Image (cartoon, grey):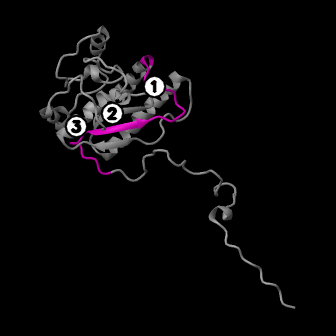
Amino acid sequence: MSRRRKRHIQLTLDQARKPVGHGGWRPNAGRPRGRKVVPHDARPEHKSRFPVHVTLRLRSDAAPIAREWLMKTIHAAIRDSHKASFQLVEFNVLSNHIHLLVEAGSTVELSRGMQGFAGRLALRLNRMLNRQGKLFATRFHARALTTPRDVRNTLRYVLLNRKHHDSHTRFDRYWIDPHSSAPWFDGWAEPIRGDYWKHELAAQPSPTRRATTWLLATGWRNRGLLRFDEMPSSG
């Protein structure tokens, strides 16, 4: 008596998948689609003569950090993160991300310096915000600035970034961002004027360090000093 041959049915990929316990496939596991993340590819070699525009993004469950009562903590973390071959030159703190202009001696010094700053800042802000766990969503995004025009455009984008995000607000002509390094920036086309708090903040010791690369210290100025009333374009 011959056996009846079993009929094979082609399964879809989702039908064929079955949870197999620890380490195996699980429903809804993996990286969520649509989330912006920085690829974990090897970073390109960093050359010390180029300043770097760095962006650090917070996790979606983190509270906004652009608050006046947190700025002393952020300033202290910046001040404590400078090294012989790594320094933070400009910054702007937004609600869910931070823009930085950084100088570093090498790729390794850039990575170590940023890891140290991010870890130090996360520890201190978590303590202030009464939270635990990771504060930053992904590893930092970095872009080398290689021309005077690129440096000037990025300085404008970083220091005046709130105008980029809050286009509906009418800013005063001499407005500067109190959550940035704008009070200590020496590249404005005019002296800081207006509200008393601007001069009071500018009189305090700067948490940042002066630029040492030609591009960030001198080169960009050949394109013209920054005006308070400029609008930032995408950096």
Q: Sequence order check: which comes first, mark 1 or mark 2?
A: 1
User: In the rendered view, does 77 fall on the left or right side of 220?
Assistant: right
Instruction: Give the number of the disc on residue 65.
Output: 1
Residue 121 at x, y percent in the picture = 44, 29
Under tag 1, what secondary structure? loop
Residue lying furthest left: 222
Work out whether 232 lies above or below 47. Answer: above
Q: Is residue 49 magenta?
A: yes
Q: Does the magenta stretch include residue 61?
A: yes
The amino acid type of the residue labelled 1 equals Ile
Q: Report the residue marked by disc 2.
A: 100
Q: Report the residue marked by disc 3.
A: 151
Residue 61 in which image quadrant: top right
Residue 223 at x, y percent in the picture = 14, 34
Magenta span dominant secondary structure: loop
Disc 3 residue crowd, few under 14, some 14–19, many 20+, Cα 10 Å: many
The amino acid type of the residue labelled 3 equals Val
Nearer to us of marks 3 and 2 is 3
Residue 38 at x, y percent in the picture = 42, 46
Nearest to the observer: residue 212 or residue 55:
55
Q: Sequence order check: which comes first, mark 3 or mark 2?
A: 2
Residue at 20%, 27% in the rendered image: 226
Quadrant assignment for the C terminus: top left
The amino acid type of the residue labelled 2 equals Leu
